[in-house]
Image (spheres, rainbow, N blue to C red):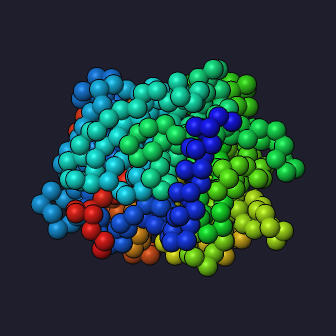
């Protein structure tokens, strides 16, 4: 290892160590625990990272900002949008630890766009584009953007060599300078062999553990879904593992067999809990990750989502602030489900509502009173014709029923395909 590499690694370790003592699980239930300025009351804006559609509006990917405060004159309306000048398969985004900037990525062009949302969240300002992820790391398809102290940790889905599923993570500083890269584990780590695939990241600073999940490479996620499901070889190219990492050392310690492509990972936000949960897209299961009683971790199948034989395709999940409930969206049937996690060993589906012809992302407010849903999964996986609804839908939740609050029709507004969401508040208020 070269001296500059040693210095970089020591810098990362020092930053992590400094954050461990005071880090608290933070933000609107599904963000990094290092993200500051929690919005515990009413959010003012919802930012939606949106896929451009040829012939629709300007055709470009864009960050769309919607007024979400019922007391505002612009409630439920688009107040700002910024196009990035091309279609790169806009997908996920994440706040920096100080919550001043949003990093948003494209799964196809591998560009990373940075927006200033701290100065005026009603009108995010474009700052810069990072276009050399593949050159710096060999990875493509930046997916998860996870705040660390002074850093952004990025999980990619694919690689520049063969566009397959073997990939890794990259760390940049908050100014956008490359710091380090980490390959996803292959070979045996413990008793299970890693597949080198990646998808999501979830950190528990108190336990010095980082969990990662797995999906598929560019060759799959850029293929038409109808064609892919008929391609036997393509259907073999999905991840079937999760990994537990020593966070301070940034080294994988265990691999878990989790068949069916485990996607989003959510740690319980209750500080008394020591578990995380994920959903598998292809097998329609909830998996619990918990201590194994021997100083390590284990993954356990604990619940079924809908009828797996019909492949409802679980996509996004959102955990409640108390760790006692989980929202699950299933793309194919357009259902939003709520699971009672009072006993995480045996989650129970207690509420189901059809919220669209196709649904993907789901985000709830910290106080649990509002739930937001968007429609797009991937450009080549979204449904066709009348089923190709594109929207942001907001609901009130009283613990018994989701009641419509407002809707933005992205097709009608010529905005494109609505994907990932993040909340912001005026003046960075803590409410």
> Residue sitting at 41 percent across and 46 percent down?
174
Say if 419 sits above or below 318 in the image. Answer: above
- Quadrant of the image for the C terminus? bottom left
> Residue sitting at 58 percent across and 37 percent down?
4
> Residue sitting at 78 percent across and 53 percent down?
254
Q: Nearer the viewer, residue 158 or 231?
A: 158
Residue 93 position within the rendered picture, expressed as x and y whole percent measured from the top left: 42, 45
- Quadrant of the image for the N terminus? top right
Q: Is residue 105 left or right of residue 116?
A: right
Name the quadrant containing residue 370: bottom left
Residue 312 position within the rendered picture, expressed as x and y whole percent measured from the top left: 59, 47
Find the residue positioned furthest to the right. Answer: 191
Q: Is residue 330 left or right of residue 167?
A: left
- Residue 53 visible to the viewer: no
Say if 153 sits above or below 235 in the image. Answer: below
Find the residue positioned furthest to the left. Answer: 73
Q: Nearer the viewer, residue 295 or 410?
A: 295
> Residue sitting at 20 percent across and 48 percent down?
123
- Residue 316 visible to the viewer: yes
Residue 91 position within the rendered picture, expressed as x and y whole percent measured from the top left: 44, 39
Tally of marks: 0
């Amino acid at each position: 290892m070269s001296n500059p590499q040693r210095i970089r690694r020591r810098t990362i370790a020092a930053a992590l160590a400094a954050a461990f003592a005071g880090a608290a699980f933070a933000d609107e239930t599904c963000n990094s625990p290092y993200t500051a300025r929690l919005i515990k009351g009413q959010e003012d804006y919802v930012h939606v990272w949106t896929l451009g559609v040829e012939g629709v509006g300007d055709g470009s990917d864009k960050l769309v900002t919607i007024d979400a405060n019922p007391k505002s004159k612009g409630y439920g309306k688009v107040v700002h949008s910024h196009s990035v000048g091309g279609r790169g398969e806009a997908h996920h985004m994440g706040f920096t630890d100080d919550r001043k900037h949003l990093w948003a990525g494209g799964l196809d062009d591998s560009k990373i766009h940075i927006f200033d949302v701290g100065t005026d969240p009603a009108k995010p300002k474009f700052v810069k584009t990072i276009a050399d992820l593949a050159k710096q790391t060999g990875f493509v398809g930046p997916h998860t953007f996870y705040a660390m102290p002074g850093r952004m940790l990025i999980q990619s889905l694919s690689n520049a060599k063969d566009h397959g599923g073997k990939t890794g993570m990259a760390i940049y500083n908050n100014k956008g300078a490359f710091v380090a890269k980490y390959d996803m584990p292959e070979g045996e780590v413990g008793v299970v062999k890693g597949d080198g695939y990646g998808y999501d990241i979830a950190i528990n600073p108190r336990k010095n553990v980082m969990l990662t999940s797995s999906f598929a490479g560019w060759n799959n996620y850029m293929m038409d879904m109808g064609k892919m499901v008929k391609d036997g070889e393509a259907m073999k190219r999905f991840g079937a593992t999760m990994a537990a990492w020593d966070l301070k050392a940034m080294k994988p310690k265990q691999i878990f067999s989790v068949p069916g492509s485990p996607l989003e990972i959510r740690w319980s936000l209750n500080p008394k809990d020591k578990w995380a949960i994920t959903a598998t897209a292809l097998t329609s299961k909830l998996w619990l990750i918990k201590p194994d009683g021997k100083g390590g971790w284990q993954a356990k199948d604990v619940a079924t989502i809908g009828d797996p034989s019909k492949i409802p395709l679980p996509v996004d999940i959102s955990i409640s602030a108390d760790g006692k409930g989980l929202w699950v969206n299933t793309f194919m049937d357009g259902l939003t489900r709520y699971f009672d996690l009072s006993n995480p060993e045996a989650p129970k589906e207690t509420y189901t509502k059809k919220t669209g012809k196709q649904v993907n992302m789901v985000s709830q407010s910290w106080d649990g009173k509002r739930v937001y849903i968007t429609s797009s999964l991937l450009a080549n996986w979204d449904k066709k014709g009348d089923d190709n609804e594109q929207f942001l839908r907001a609901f009130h939740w009283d613990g018994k029923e989701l009641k419509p609050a407002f809707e933005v029709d992205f097709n009608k507004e010529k905005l494109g395909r609505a994907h990932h969401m993040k909340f912001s508040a005026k003046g960075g208020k803590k409410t």
